[in-house]
Amino acid sequence: MAEKRYKKLQTAAELNKLLEWHYTQAKYLRFGKPLAWVTSGAPVEILRTMGILALYPENYGALCGARAAAATLCATVESQGYAQDLCAYAKSSLGAMMAPKQAPLGGLPRPDVLICCNNICGTVLKWYEAVARFYDVPLFILDTPFLHDEADALPPHVVAYVLAQLGDLIEFLERHTRRRFQPAKLQEAAELANQATALWLEIRELCKAKPSPLNAPDLFVNMAPVVVLRGTRECVDFYRRLKAEVAQRVAQGVGAIPRERYRLLWDNIAIWPKLYRFYNLFVDYDACFVVDTYTGGWSLQLLGGDPLDGLARTYTGVFLNQSLQYRARRMIEMVEDFAVDGFVMHSNRSCKPYSLGQYDMKRLVSERTGRTGLIIEADHCDPRAYAEEPIKTRVQAFMEALSEQEKQG
């Protein structure tokens, strides 16, 4: 099996059980708790304080892609008049609603409320509006202003604007779920979120070791808890055990792939339908993706003493809500910090906000670091956008360029 080309983590079985419990609880073991569908950039800690369960359709879209169900679900939605160029996460989610028998886990259970934050993209606005109409459930939209400047501190008026909306969100949830917001529990959820994100950051930092203990598929698969279980004790406990295993690999000099020769950086979301097949094209050349721009998006710490203020600052400052200059700077820092030899950028047909500007970013990063970059065209969920032979050819040419770069010192 392709997955066995590099060492599998012992905590993989625990991760599967944890995520299975997450979906099972929402579908069968709610015991009267309200259920919210939320975007990945929504302040879920507030929901934790109110005993509201949360599911992430984006995470479910990744699951559809990984289980080879996305193409069928996307085609179902397209047959109803939705455009082929829409995000495949959105189409997979809508397709699972329309044809649950064709969807993994039988689709997601019906939500009681919807929480949508536009800090990740604009597609989620119309996506969640479609869900709200389909289920006839209330929708709350949290607007975070895009950060055009690279200032270290957010402008006070931006923080105040988002903070006011968090108050509106609490009022919305109390009205539609009949659950009371408990400030003391928010502090607890914020502390758990900070513990989990700190552990995830430390795990990623361990990949600075040579050889790297993790490769791209490890990073993408193991980011799931810090997204869907953020603010819970179960999330913290899992990352403590994962960190211990990864640290042990570093101490013993065990690499994620058999012979690490090249260290690479990945930009954008994973190609879920081809997760191992694609990345093993690089393993064949002894290349390991030691860092990426995506999974670190959930290693942000809640800032400030007041939890609500911290939520306003943190969720406004996520990676995709930042300028191209900021994103290029972060990539340059990763190249240097992780001793990267080259970088690969996924021009993702589904995720326009992540992909627009990549050619400029590629030029900026190469000019500043001297490292060779490659842009691959595909889709994070829909396998119909994956052209295997052209991609193989481009990977081969890229790795030959890295070999020449290595020879020249």
Image (cartoon, rainbow, N blue to C red):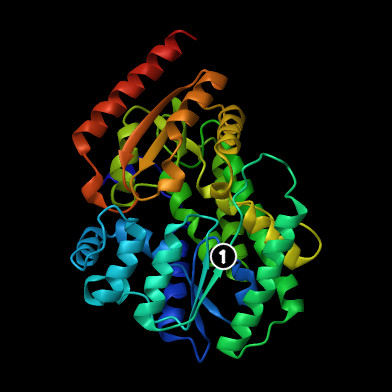
User: How crowded is the residue under tag 1: few (<14 C-alpha within 10 Å), some, or many (20+)?
Assistant: many
Which amino acid type corresponds to the residue marked 1 in the rendered image?
Answer: Ala
Count of residue discs: 1
Q: Quadrant of residue 343?
A: top left
Lateral position of residue 141 relative to residue 397, left or right: right
When the figure is inspected, residue 382 is found, relative to residue 357, above or below; the finding is: below
Q: Quadrant of residue 303?
A: bottom right
393 or 284, which is in the foreground? 393
Instruction: Say which residue appears at 66% left-offset and 40% top-offset.
Output: 149
Instruction: Say which residue appears at 75% left-offset and 77% top-offset.
Output: 183
When the figure is inspected, residue 29 is found, relative to residue 195, above or below; the finding is: below
> How far across and down, in percent of the image, does residue 106 sit?
29, 76
Q: Is residue 341 visible?
A: no
> How far across and down, in percent of the image, does residue 28 sit?
41, 85
Q: Is residue 113 visible?
A: yes
158 or 320, which is in the foreground? 158
> How far across and down, in percent of the image, does residue 33 sit?
53, 87
Lateral position of residue 79 relative to residue 266, left or right: left
When the figure is inspected, residue 155 is found, relative to residue 15, above or below; the finding is: above
> How far across and down, in percent of the image, does residue 389 sit?
19, 33
Instruction: Say which residue appears at 62% left-offset and 88% top-offset.
Output: 179
Instruction: Say which residue appears at 28% left-offset and 43% top-offset.
Output: 277
* Residue carrying label 1: 42
Q: Residue furthest right?
A: 305
306 or 63, which is in the foreground? 306
Secondary structure state at the residue bearing disc 1: loop
Q: Residue furthest top?
A: 408
